[in-house]
Amino acid sequence: MLTVISCPDCGVPAEVTERFCLPSTDGSVKHVALSCAAGHHFRMAVDRLPVQAQEQLARQETRTKPRTVQLCIHCRENPAGFWVRRRNSRVVHRPWCLSCCQELDPDLCDVTPFGG
């Protein structure tokens, strides 16, 4: 869904190209990536935007359900789809992607698909 707000630097229309959360010691912090018509690009916390833009994003967020994707803990690039843990280990399982799972020794690791 296209979201247009004012550029925080020059005030011209800016498109929200990405929404994401980053962890902090006080919990996750909502962030946005912006690109304005004048060529400015930002990646910033939502709470640093003007109040009007924050309200606009909040209204739109209530209309759309955010989708989160867990990344592979091994490569940190691909979406994870499997839980992996060492056999006979007390360590909890970790999220891995299919590509990284193919490198594992099946005799040493338990691999379980998400939801499985």
Image: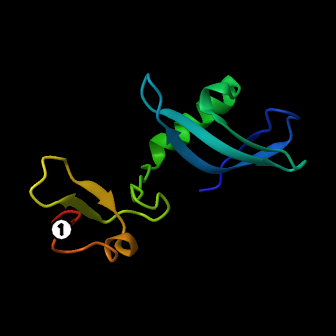
Q: Secondary structure at mark 1?
A: loop
Quadrant, the C terminus: bottom left
Q: Is residue 75 left or right of residue 60?
A: left
Q: Nearer the viewer, residue 85 or 55?
A: 85
Tell me how many marks there are: 1
Residue beneath the point at 88% across and 35% down = 10
Q: Nearer the viewer, residue 70 or 75?
A: 75
| Residue 68 position within the rendered picture, expressed as x and y whole percent measured from the top left | 41, 52
Q: Residues within 10 Å of mark 1 (few under 14, many from 20)?
A: few
Q: Is residue 5 left or right of residue 72?
A: right
* 112 up-or-down from 67: above or below: below
| Residue 78 position within the rendered picture, expressed as x and y whole percent measured from the top left | 46, 65
Q: Nearer the viewer, residue 108 or 82?
A: 108
* 45 up-or-down from 94: above or below: above
Q: Nearer the viewer, residue 61 or 88?
A: 88
* 104 up-or-down from 75: above or below: below
Return the residue found at the far bottom: 102
| Residue 102 position within the rendered picture, expressed as x and y whole percent measured from the top left | 33, 77
Residue beneath the point at 47% across and 46% down = 63
* 20 up-or-down from 87: above or below: above
The amino acid sitting under disc 1 is Leu
Q: How is the image coloured?
A: rainbow
Residue beneath the point at 46% across and 40% down = 62
| Residue 41 position within the rendered picture, expressed as x and y whole percent measured from the top left | 79, 46
Quadrant, the N terminus: bottom right
Residue beneath the point at 24% across and 60% down = 83
Q: Is residue 87 left or right of residue 51?
A: left
State the residue position of label 1.
Answer: 108
Q: Where is residue 57, by image quadrant?
A: top right
